[in-house]
Image (spheres, grey):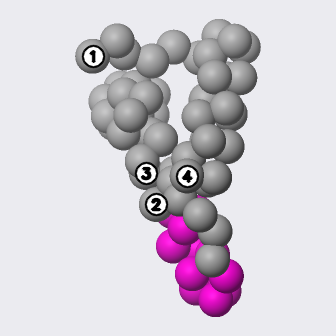
């Protein structure tokens, strides 16, 4: 069973964006560093767009 079959939410771009953004902000907070959420989200969106260009597919819903 593939990861995307087991965890269907990983095919939802909005879910992946929020999950990664929250994880990065949380990790940085543990190191007592502040990173603007908008900046992290912009980086995550850019990386996901790059992944789409390389063939990664997300659900349209």
Q: Which residue has dot 4 on it?
A: 38
The CA span between labels 2 and 1 is 21 Å
Which tag, 2 or 1, sits closer to the chain's start?
Answer: 2
Secondary structure beneath disc 4? helix
The CA span between labels 1 and 3 is 17 Å
**Residue drawn at x 67%, y 32% as measured from the top left:** 46
x and y, in percent, of residue 55 in the image: 65, 10
x and y, in percent, of residue 9 in the image: 32, 34
Quadrant location of residue 59? top left
x and y, in percent, of residue 61 in the image: 27, 16
**Residue drawn at x 62%, y 42% as measured from the top left:** 42
Which tag, 4 or 2, sits closer to the chain's start?
Answer: 2
The magenta segment: 23-33
Q: Which residue has dot 3 on it?
A: 19
Quadrant location of residue 5? top left
Q: Is residue 46 left or right of residue 59?
A: right
Which tag, 4 or 3, sits closer to the chain's start?
Answer: 3
Q: Are marks 2 and 3 in contact (CB under 8 Å)?
A: yes
Q: Which residue has dot 1 on it?
A: 61
Q: Which residue has dot 2 on it?
A: 22
Quadrant location of residue 34? bottom right
The mark closer to the camera, 4 or 2, is 4
Is 25 magenta? The answer is yes
């Amino acid at each position: 069973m593939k990861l995307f079959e087991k965890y269907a939410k990983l095919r939802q771009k909005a879910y992946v964006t929020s999950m990664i953004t929250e994880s990065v902000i949380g990790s940085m907070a543990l190191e007592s560093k502040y990173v603007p959420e908008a900046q992290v989200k912009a980086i995550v969106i850019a990386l996901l767009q790059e992944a789409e260009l390389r063939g990664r597919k997300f659900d349209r819903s």
